[in-house]
């Protein structure tokens, strides 16, 4: 575990968890660990429990569920097609807000967010 803390090819979260475990082995209090490592109290409490359950696997990230997709593939295709068309009079190009409003107007989706439009445009740029 000392090698993990010294080497720089590990994630910051892994290093923090390793430091927490080393401090716990050195009989540091939870308050001291929170203050010195600038981490949350829940992390300090949870990491030793995970060590008991998962051994050194507790240093690794657990998979995250992530958010569900807002638009289907067909809806994204309509969005990309709308972005490729000439913009309406006024703006020089289609903005995320205009595209999001157009997706709702064409009834491709019940609601659309500018961030979703931005992510789709970024993927297909």
Image: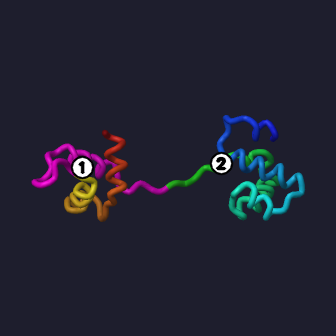
Q: Earlier in the sequence, mark 2 or mark 1?
A: 2
Among the 4 quarters of the image, the one containing residue 122: top left
Marks 2/1: CA distance? 36 Å
Q: What residue appears at the point 65 percent right and 42 percent down from the top-left corner?
A: 11
Q: What residue appears at the point 36 percent right and 42 percent down from the top-left corner?
A: 123
Q: Outermost residue toward the left?
A: 89
Q: Is residue 89 left or right of residue 95?
A: left
Q: Check the picture and name the quadrant holding the N terminus.
A: top right
Position in image of residue 47 (x %, y %):
76, 56
Q: Nearer the viewer, residue 89 or 78?
A: 89
Whether residue 51 is situated above or below residue 30 in the rendered picture? above
Among the 4 quarters of the image, the one containing residue 107: bottom left
Position in image of residue 19 (x %, y %):
77, 49
Does 38 lie within the magenta span? no
Q: What residue appears at the point 81 percent right and 51 percent down from the top-left corner?
A: 21
Numbered tag placed on residue 61 in the rendering:
2
Front: mark 2 or 1: 2
Q: Secondary structure at mark 1?
A: helix
Q: Nearer the viewer, residue 26 or 66?
A: 26
The residue stretch that appears in magenta: 67-94
Q: Nearer the viewer, residue 116 or 17?
A: 17
Does 71 lie within the magenta span? yes
Q: Outermost residue toward the front?
A: 36
Q: Is residue 119 left or right of residue 21?
A: left
Neighbourhood count class around disc 2 (C-alpha, 10 Å): few under 14, some 14–19, many 20 upward: few
Whether residue 77 is situated above or below residue 114 in the rendered picture? above
Q: Is residue 95 left or right of residue 38?
A: left
Q: Check the picture and name the quadrant holding the C terminus.
A: top left
Q: Which residue is mark 1?
A: 78
Q: Nearer the viewer, residue 48 or 22?
A: 22
Position in image of residue 59 (x %, y %):
73, 47
């Amino acid at each position: 575990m000392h090698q993990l803390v010294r080497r720089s090819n590990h994630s910051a979260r892994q290093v923090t968890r390793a430091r927490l475990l080393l401090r716990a082995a050195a009989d540091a209090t939870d308050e001291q660990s929170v203050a010195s490592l600038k981490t949350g109290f829940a992390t300090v409490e949870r990491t030793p429990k995970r060590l008991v359950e998962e051994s050194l696997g507790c240093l690794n990230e657990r998979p995250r569920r992530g958010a569900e997709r807002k638009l289907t593939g067909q809806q994204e295709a309509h969005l990309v097609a709308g972005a490729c068309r000439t913009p309406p009079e006024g703006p020089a190009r289609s903005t995320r807000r205009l595209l999001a409003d157009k997706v709702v107007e064409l009834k491709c989706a019940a609601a659309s967010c500018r961030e979703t439009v931005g992510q789709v445009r970024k993927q297909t740029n």
